[in-house]
Image (spheres, rainbow, N blue to C red):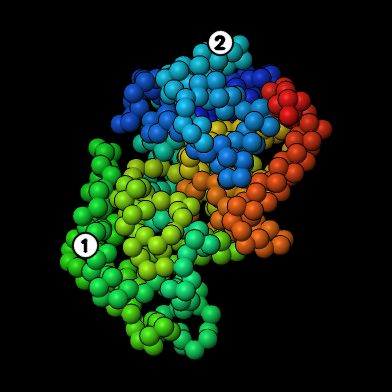
């Protein structure tokens, strides 16, 4: 019997353990809590939710809804437990977090194929002892010792110990009548620049800065240090140094000419395409510690962003993750393990995905490929038209630079063959295309014996 060690019993690790144990593998699931706690966890339960209890929208024509359809079709047990413990939340899937965690924990404890241990694994080498494959799913609060070990075998420049991400907005929510496309010092007479620019008048700029410095910030937890904010200053902290500080830094208008006025704007925000198709844009230099509602309120004061929809809000918090584009294959396997002979896979937020359902799905994905590897089966490739397939393609593309954790969104999906202007119809078309691709993928998994009993039941139910 093949033995698999899974480090971390969060959403990804719990899903992977249940999937592999159901396929006849011997699973050793190691969770350091409660023997070694974290600043945010309260219990030693598996799949404990530490932030919101919401797993986002269930609307089929949303990226989050597409992801849930994938989880259901593939027989995700953690997703099924979420449905079992759902609480009223409008169009979202929210859970009774304690009942949800207890159900997952009970399933794991009672499964004859899973050995649940509570101890700190301090190195990748330790995780590999006696195992035929390893899945690291220790999350954004991976212990310092394990993070250091992973850093040593992957290269320290491929690890991030703090997340400093600027917001990303959807392209079709921007007012292109107010924005102009131009790179710095580029002739304004028709050249196509790499950046969109949001020009401020003096009055608009000063009103924006006033609201920016007064906005509510996320409470910094004990695991965050001053070093983070010295090395990577949030835009609101820069603004506190003086009203003109951002205008001589992130918002400098030097080298830009607003075609609407023929003059240099008082200040300007540059937006950089986040994907090859220009479906979403990054607010350049806008790392922030503002709360999500305040980001939405204040950043919508930027000319051209009045109706901006956020594919990702900016974050500034402790978040250990690896540079997935450089380190992971599309199977979520480490490309190089620094001499470690056992195949090592990475799932959950440690792999650079963001979001509850994304973590569950990554655990399921890693489990499928571990099962294929140890079973001598060639697993089918996950279509990029699916929600997780799009995220996986983005997260493991070696050409992706300055990678930050990402959740599923339409901005990273392959464009439709025919452009659909109506947003609702366009999102429905994404969902329909993804559903068809998912059906073909499930058929391929079934043909090579990888779908599993839960997935078969879900398929028959559909």
- In what quadrant of the picture does the N terminus appear? top right
Instruction: Residue at 61% x, 15% y: name it.
Output: 113
Give above or below for 225 relative to 342. below
Dot 2, how many residues are within 10 Å of its Cα: few (below 14), some (14-19), or many (20+)? Answer: few
The answer to which image quadrant residue 283 occupies is bottom left
- Residue 32 screen position, x and y as percent: 40, 24
The answer to whether residue 297 is seen in the rendering is yes
**Residue 149: percent from left, percent from top:** 43, 38
Could you say which disc has been placed on residue 110 in the image?
2
Q: Which mark is residue 210?
A: 1
Is 229 displayed left or right of 357 in the figure? left
Q: Of 431 and 282, which appears nearest the observer?
A: 431
Quadrant of the image occupied by residue 287: bottom left
N-terminal of the pair, mark 1 or mark 2, is 2
The spot of residue 141 in percent (x, y) is: 38, 35
Q: Position of residue 254 (x, y in %)?
A: 33, 80
Tag 1 and tag 2, C-beta contact below 8 Å: no
Q: Is residue 242 left or right of residue 461?
A: left
| Residue at the image point whose x is 25% and y is 58% from the top | 212
From the viewer's side, name the closer residue of 279 and 358.
279
The secondary element bearing badge 2 is classed as helix
Q: Residue furthest right?
A: 447
């Amino acid at each position: 019997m093949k033995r698999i060690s899974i480090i971390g019993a969060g959403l990804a690790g719990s899903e992977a353990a249940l999937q592999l144990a159901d396929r006849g593998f011997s699973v050793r699931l190691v969770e350091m809590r409660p023997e070694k706690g974290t600043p945010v966890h309260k219990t030693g339960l598996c799949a404990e939710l530490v932030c919101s209890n919401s797993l986002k929208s269930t609307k089929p024509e949303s990226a989050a809804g597409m992801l849930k359809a994938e989880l259901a079709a593939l027989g995700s047990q953690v997703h099924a437990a979420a449905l079992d413990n759902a609480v009223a939340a409008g169009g979202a899937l929210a859970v009774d977090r304690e009942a949800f965690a207890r159900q997952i924990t009970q399933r794991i404890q009672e499964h004859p194929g899973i050995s649940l241990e509570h101890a700190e694994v301090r190195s990748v080498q330790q995780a590999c002892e006696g195992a035929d494959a390893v899945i690291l799913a220790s999350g954004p609060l991976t212990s310092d010792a394990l993070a250091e070990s992973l850093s040593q075998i992957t290269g320290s420049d491929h690890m991030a110990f703090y997340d400093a991400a600027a917001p990303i907005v959807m392209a079709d929510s921007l007012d292109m009548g107010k924005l102009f496309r131009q790179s710095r010092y580029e002739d304004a007479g028709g050249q196509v620049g790499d950046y969109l620019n949001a020009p401020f008048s003096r009055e608009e700029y000063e009103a924006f800065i006033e609201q920016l410095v007064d906005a509510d910030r996320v409470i910094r937890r004990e695991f965050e240090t001053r070093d983070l904010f010295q090395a990577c200053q949030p835009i609101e902290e820069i603004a506190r140094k003086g009203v003109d500080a951002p205008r001589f830094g992130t918002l400098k208008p030097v080298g830009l000419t607003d075609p609407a006025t023929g003059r240099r704007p008082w200040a300007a925000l540059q937006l950089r395409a986040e994907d090859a198709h220009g479906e979403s844009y990054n607010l350049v230099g806008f790392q922030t510690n503002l709360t999500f509602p305040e980001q939405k309120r204040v950043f919508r004061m930027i000319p051209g962003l009045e109706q901006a929809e956020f594919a990702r809000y900016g974050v500034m918090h402790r978040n250990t993750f690896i540079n997935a584009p450089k380190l992971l294959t599309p199977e979520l396997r480490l490309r190089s393990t620094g001499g470690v002979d056992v195949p090592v896979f990475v799932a959950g937020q440690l792999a650079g995905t963001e979001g509850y359902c994304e973590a569950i799905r990554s655990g399921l994905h890693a489990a499928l490929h571990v099962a294929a590897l140890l079973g001598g089966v060639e697993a089918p490739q996950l279509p990029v038209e699916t929600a997780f397939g799009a995220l996986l393609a983005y997260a493991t593309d070696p050409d992706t630079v300055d990678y930050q954790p990402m959740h599923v969104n339409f901005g990273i999906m392959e464009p439709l063959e025919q452009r659909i202007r109506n947003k609702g119809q366009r999102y429905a078309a994404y969902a329909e295309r993804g559903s068809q691709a998912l059906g073909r993928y499930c058929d391929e998994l079934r043909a090579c014996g990888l779908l599993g009993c839960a997935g078969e039941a879900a398929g028959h139910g559909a």
